[in-house]
Image (cartoon, coloured by chain):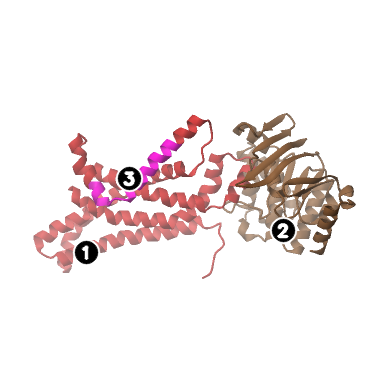
Chain colours: A brown, B red
Amino acid sequence: MLQISKLTKQFGSQQVLKGISARFPEKQTTVIVGPSGSGKTTLLRSLDLLVRPDSGELMFDDLKLDFSQPISSKQRNKLRNKTSMVFQNWNLFPNLTILQNITSAPIHVHKVAVDQAEHQAHKLLQEVGLDEYATAYPHELSGGQQQRISICRALAVQPQYILLDEPTSALDPERENQILRMLERLSNEGNSLIMVTHNMQFAKNVADKILFLEDGELQFDGDKEAFFSAKTDRIQQFLQGVTLN
Amino acid sequence: MWEIWSSSLPSLFGAMLKFTIPLSLLSFAIGLVIAVVVALIKFLPVQGNRFIKLLWQGIRLLVSFYVWAFRSTPLLVQLFIIFFGLPSIGIKLAPFTAAVIGFSLNTGAYGSETIRSALLAVNQDQWDAAYTLGFSTPQTLWRIIMPQALRIVLPPLSNEFIGLVKDTSLASTITIAEMFQVSQQIAAQNFQPLTMYIEVAFLYAILCTILSTLQHYLERRSSKFVQEVSH
């Protein structure tokens, strides 16, 4: 299981994470919510070391990272081999075809045979109804299609955890629904997801656990029923604001 | 005029094949290698202990000095220092070698900044996406960043190559009988400088047109993954 303890991160004079501790249970969906600038994305990126916390610890199975000490590339790779991230703007590699986008990491990082990686990629593409685009380049696809490909790319490395950073916020409502249905399916199939989202309805549908962050501090850590029925003023205020929006 | 042109063309063409083209190709190839190495030294962050970081800073300072020195002084002066200046400290070079060294170092200095700017122009998100999939820095650079940077770097780098082809005429000042010097020699014999220099200008223009065509071909090939933009 992935756990963090007392994570801190400062950008310039701004303290973005103020000693966050949390557990991310396997085969569950943890949703991180909070107002803009609360540190949600920084927290998520810390879990994949795209942001290096200043202090605190990260524990993942037998791996233990103490951020007050230097992190070796071996430790970093070990963590990244267990996780994979889906970005808000999908970040597909524009110079590679759709098939190459999905197979590049299995082939070059995990040393999977080309045939096997391509077979697996076609299977994933068929599942999302985009196999006919295997030889296309990302710019030939719509935003929603690109996001589905980026989820396939994340799944292709068979990560223990999939990290998703506002995966639908750059999409129109119709395409947003397509992605949300796909993520709901992944969640129901027992994948371990950690997701930052502003979509409270979706959080209500798929989350097993909610982390509510504000001003770099964890204000709530518990199951979704407890969150949505929370009586604290701040959570009520946040939920009302989100609903109104 | 046609008679002068046709009688001098074989000599000029010979000088082009013997010096102008080899000098340009060799200097650009070596300059490109220098440019890539220097650009990567200045671009890549260093990881490791304090000693490695200090060493890397020292190397960075050294290559920054090299880029500054060659961008801040005229190419002609650089050629003179290498060919006429270095013998006074015991380094005597053949004219062709001196020219290749001068042109390569000059191309390397300018090219390094062009390549570095292309690497910087590739979105940071691409690094993040590659890292999160487990790619190492060299793998990310080679498979993801460089192919995208190549598309960006082609036009300015082609410009530099075309500039270099024309700059090889400066090699005439260090006794190399390249195309321009041969035209000077013939003009001195037939007293027809205007005719001769127009002819040599025309030959340089042909060479550069071929390179421009090649540039457009390479640009099309390297842009196949980019959406066409109508202007």
The residue indicated by pointer 3 is B105
In-image side of A182 versus B165 (left or right): right
Crowding near pointer 2: few (<14 within 10 Å), some, many (20+)?
A: some
Label 3, secondary structure: give it: helix
Q: Residue at x 43, y 58 (%)?
A: B155
Spatial CA distance of label 2 from label 1 is 63 Å
Chain ID at mark 1: B
- Disc 2 vs disc 3: Cβ atoms closer than 8 Å? no
Chain ID at mark 3: B
Question: What amino acid is at disc 2?
Answer: Ser
The answer as to whether the residues below labels 2 and 1 share one chain is no
Question: What amino acid is at disc 3?
Answer: Leu
In-image side of B139 versus A211 (left or right): left
Chain ID at mark 2: A
Q: Nearer the viewer, mark 2 or mark 1?
A: 2
Q: Main secondary structure of the magenta part?
A: helix
- Residue A156 is at least partly visible in this image: no
The residue indicated by pointer 2 is A169
- In the rendering, which numbered label is found on residue B199? 1
Question: What amino acid is at disc 1?
Answer: Glu
Q: Position of residue B204 (x, y in %)?
A: 27, 60
Residue B64, image quadrant: top left
Crowding near pointer 3: few (<14 within 10 Å), some, many (20+)?
A: many
Label 1, secondary structure: give it: helix
The answer as to whether the residues below labels 2 and 3 share one chain is no
Query: Who comes first in sequence, dot 3 or dot 1?
Result: 3
User: Which range is magenta?
Assistant: B57-79
Q: Position of residue A197 (x, y in %)?
A: 76, 53
**A92 or B209: nearer the viewer:** A92
Spatial CA distance of label 2 from label 3 is 49 Å
> Does the stretch in magenta take in B166?
no
